[in-house]
Image: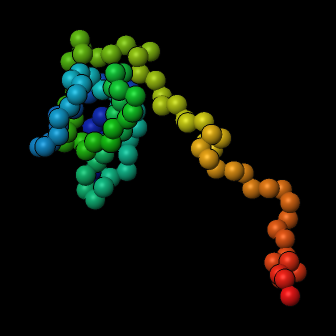
């Protein structure tokens, strides 16, 4: 079994594969080591200028130069979203009353 070349917290650059366009060039930081997909090792990476993380294969990454490394406080862990609220979306909460017996309410 292969081992990951990069560790969590290490600065890397992303080389896009054919057909993909990167809006940001610069250093990414490895935020998690992912389990392999078949025999391809994967990583979760984060850029300071993007609000999301990317999952990429190991062959798409290169070690970053020392001047391209972002400051440690620029990369933060993703924020977990708050609980979803349905207020204002036209969805009513279920009433607390028990359901009525339909057979008893039918006209005879």
- The quarter of the rendered structure image containing the N terminus is bottom left
Give percent across and percent down for residue 29: 34, 27
Question: Looking at the rendering, which quadrant does residue 55 occupy?
Answer: top left
Q: In the drawing, does residue 47 fall left or right of residue 65?
A: right
Q: Nearer the viewer, residue 95 or 74?
A: 95
Quadrant in the rendering for residue 5: top left
Q: Residue at x 37, y 50 (%)?
A: 35
Residue 89 location (% of width, % of height): 59, 44
Q: Nearer the viewer, residue 31 or 52?
A: 52
- Vertical order, 99 against 101 (above or below): above
Is 86 displayed left or right of 41 in the figure?
right
Left or right, residue 105 beside residue 12: right
In the foreground, 93 or 57: 93
Residue at 33% x, 16% y: name it: 70
Specify the farthest residue to the front: 108
Q: Which quadrant holds residue 16?
A: top left
Q: Is residue 84 above or below residue 30?
A: below
Question: Dividing the image into 4 quarters, which one contains the C terminus?
Answer: bottom right
């Amino acid at each position: 079994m292969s081992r990951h070349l990069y560790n969590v917290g290490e600065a890397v650059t992303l080389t896009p594969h054919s057909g993909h366009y990167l809006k940001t060039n610069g250093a990414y930081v490895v935020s998690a080591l992912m389990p392999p997909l078949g025999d391809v090792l994967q990583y979760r990476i984060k850029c300071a200028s993007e609000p999301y993380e990317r999952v990429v294969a190991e062959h798409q990454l290169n070690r970053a130069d020392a001047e391209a490394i972002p400051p440690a406080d620029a990369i933060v862990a993703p924020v977990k979203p708050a609980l979803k609220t349905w207020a204002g979306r036209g969805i009513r909460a279920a009433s607390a009353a028990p359901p009525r017996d339909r057979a008893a309410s039918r006209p005879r």
